[in-house]
Image (cartoon, rainbow, N blue to C red):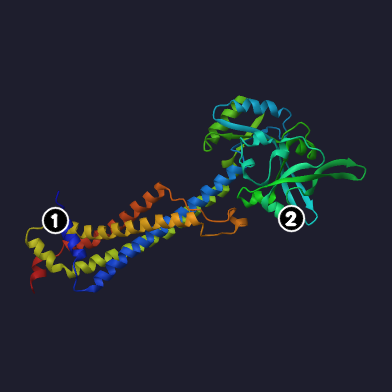
């Protein structure tokens, strides 16, 4: 099928050698401007999406999807029954009891306040990825009976702070102690490092430690009790429905919280940043579209005689409008295509080789991941094409209003 004559004329105008090279220069600048704008928006959205998804993945690797508490706020007396009931709820992938508490960890060359979590390794592996994230040592000591100091898994950064390794002994001081004539004395216990855990989140790696459930119960005065029961769902985004199903199965007297509620402020801030950065950088495309306006205006001035001849040969004003709209659209399409390809390739390279490093203690991860979603890319490309199309409307209307008699009077 033959292309419409308006398109052929538009392409010829764009590719023909002009008397005024300045117009060709502006056309090139317009293409480059649109390409840079599209590339910048895609890279920015890829950065923010990658950051958000990576933090979410790592948080869910170290924490449960849903946590179950007693409505009174007291520890669970019969946590084994709760674990068994919840395990049979549809959509539940795993359940595990846990004991939480704060304590001071002290070694011969350092000290740090840490969150201690008592776990049953076999159950914990169905809820979090902590067991799979052990870098040094082994989880086996936490699964076997022990004599002497209880085994403990330390976050990798916490182990560095304490300057300890596998086999070293650490003193644990719990604020929950025994009442004495001189007041409450803190409980002090010795634990032996069985391994280190690296979740990839600085918050967890620098201040979390994992004990056998029984050892944590003794340390925090929760004999045969659990602070909460943690749950992993088949669908991590179905926490509202999953939480409701769990409460229905357990009956009254229980409450739940989920990872969305616990991290709502963080992900809301990341979403706002993503939108703000996308809109701000997207203004580059709007600025670049002004070059398209300038290009078409100058081209109308240069081609006024050709326009008059076309109109005298029978071309309608609508056809003249379409010619210049097609010229601007072609410039926008070329720039958008180049920008899209370069932006996609940039995201792939930056993500593959982890070229951008960031402060781990601020952003929780050491390098910036890039994840360019098809939906985001589609919105950017369509928006860029639409902006470029809108930029052609005024010059094209000016071209269609050229008076053939006036244009040819002095020719």
Q: Is residue 24 above or below residue 137?
A: below
Residue 52 spot, x, y in % from top left: 52, 49
Res 263 quadrant in image: top right
Q: CA distance from mark 1 to mark 2?
A: 77 Å
Q: Which residue is mark 1?
A: 5
Residue 297 spot, x, y in % from top left: 23, 67
Q: Secondary structure at mark 1?
A: helix
Kindly report which numbered mark, 1 or 2, lies closer to the viewer in this rendering: 2
Q: Is residue 399 above or below residue 145?
A: below
Res 253 quadrant in image: top right
Residue 58 spot, x, y in % from top left: 58, 46
Q: On the picture, is 188 further left or further right than 100?
A: right
Query: 67 or 318: nearer the eye?
Result: 67
Q: Residue at x 76, y 39 (%)?
A: 216
Query: 67 or 305: nearer the eye?
Result: 67
Q: Which residue is mark 2?
A: 163
Residue 7 spot, x, y in % from top left: 18, 56
- Viewer can see residue 184: yes
Residue 294 marker: none
Q: Residue at x 14, y 56 (%)?
A: 5
User: Which comes sooner in the sequence, label 1 or label 2?
Assistant: 1
Q: Which residue is the extreme one toward the right?
A: 181
């Amino acid at each position: 099928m033959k292309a419409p004559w308006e398109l052929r004329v538009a392409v010829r105008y764009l590719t023909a050698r002009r008397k005024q090279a300045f117009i060709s220069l502006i056309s090139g600048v317009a293409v480059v401007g649109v390409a840079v704008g599209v590339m910048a928006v895609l890279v920015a959205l890829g950065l923010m999406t990658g950051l958000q998804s990576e933090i979410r993945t790592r948080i869910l690797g170290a924490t449960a999807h849903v946590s179950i508490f007693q409505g009174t706020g007291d520890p669970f007396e019969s946590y084994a029954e709760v674990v068994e009931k919840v395990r049979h709820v549809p959509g539940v992938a795993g359940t595990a009891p846990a004991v939480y508490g704060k304590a001071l960890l002290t070694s011969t060359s350092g000290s740090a306040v840490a969150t201690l979590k008592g776990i049953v390794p076999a159950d914990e592996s169905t809820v979090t990825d902590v067991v799979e994230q052990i870098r040094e040592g082994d989880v086996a000591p936490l699964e076997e009976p022990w004599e002497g100091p209880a085994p403990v898994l330390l976050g990798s950064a916490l182990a560095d702070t304490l300057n300890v390794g596998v086999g070293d002994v650490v003193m644990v001081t719990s604020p929950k102690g025994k009442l004495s004539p001189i007041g409450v004395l803190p409980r002090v216990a010795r634990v032996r490092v069985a391994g280190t855990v690296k979740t990839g989140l600085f918050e967890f790696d620098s201040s979390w430690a994992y004990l056998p459930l029984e050892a944590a119960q003794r340390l925090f005065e929760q004999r045969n009790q659990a602070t909460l029961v943690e749950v992993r769902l088949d669908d991590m985004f179905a926490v509202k429905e999953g939480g409701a199903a769990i409460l229905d199965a357990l009956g009254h007297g229980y409450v739940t919280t989920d990872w969305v509620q616990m991290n709502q402020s963080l992900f809301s801030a990341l979403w706002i940043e993503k939108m703000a950065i996308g809109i701000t950088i997207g203004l580059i495309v709007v600025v670049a579209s002004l070059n398209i306006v300038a290009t078409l205006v100058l081209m109308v001035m240069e081609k006024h005689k050709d326009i008059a001849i076309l109109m005298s040969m029978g071309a309608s004003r609508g056809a003249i409008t379409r010619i210049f709209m097609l010229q601007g659209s072609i410039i926008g399409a070329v720039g958008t295509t180049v920008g899209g390809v370069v932006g996609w390739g940039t995201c792939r390279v930056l993500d593959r080789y982890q070229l951008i490093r960031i402060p781990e203690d601020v952003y929780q991860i050491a390098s910036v991941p890039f994840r360019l979603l098809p939906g985001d890319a589609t919105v950017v490309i369509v928006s860029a094409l639409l902006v470029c199309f809108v930029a052609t409307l005024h010059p094209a209307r000016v071209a269609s209003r050229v008076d053939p008699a006036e244009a040819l009077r002095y020719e």
